[in-house]
């Protein structure tokens, strides 16, 4: 009976000990949310007039996001 108790406790200790080892380590290179500053820019096509959605070149304002 003593051997069974020792085996049971060792199994429990090893199980919970391995759970802390298997945790996913923090990755400092994971993507983060950042703020993009808005502003004004020119949108359109300077060179090719075949894309009618891109002409004329016009000023676009984008808010922060």
Image (cartoon, helix red, strand yellow):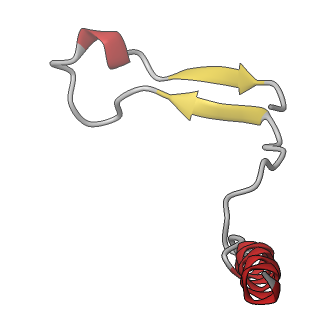
Q: Quadrant of residue 39?
A: top right
Q: From what the image shows, is residue 55 above or below residue 32?
A: above
Q: Foreground residue, 39 or 30? A: 30
Percent across and percent down for residue 46 are 35, 34
Quarter where residue 31 is shown: bottom right
The quadrant of the rendering that contains the C terminus is top right
Quadrant assignment, res 56 = top left
Q: Residue 17: x, y in percent?
A: 79, 81
Q: Furthest residue to the top?
A: 52
Q: Residue drawn 21% across and 21% down?
A: 49
**How many dots with numbers?**
0
Q: Position of residue 14 (x, y in %)?
A: 73, 83
Residue, x 21% and y 30% (percent of image)?
A: 48
Is residue 58 left or right of 37 when viewed as pictured? left
Residue lying furthest front in this view? 1
Q: On screen, 7 above or below 46?
A: below
Q: Residue at x 78, y 47 (%)?
A: 33
Above-or-below relation of 10 to 27? below
* Lateral position of residue 32 relative to residue 64, left or right: left
- Left or right: residue 53 versus residue 24 is left
Q: Quadrant of the N terminus?
A: bottom right
Which of the two residues, 37 or 43, is positioned nearer the viewer here? 37
Q: Among all residues in the image, which is located at the extreme left? A: 50
> Foreground: 24 or 9?
9
Compared to 10, does 44 lie above or below? above
């Amino acid at each position: 009976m003593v051997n069974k108790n020792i085996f049971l406790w060792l199994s429990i200790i090893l199980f919970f000990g391995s759970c802390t080892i298997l945790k996913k380590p923090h990755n400092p290179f994971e993507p983060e949310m950042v703020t993009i500053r808005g502003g004004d820019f020119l949108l359109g096509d300077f060179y090719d007039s075949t894309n009618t959605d891109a002409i004329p070149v016009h000023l676009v304002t984008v808010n922060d996001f």
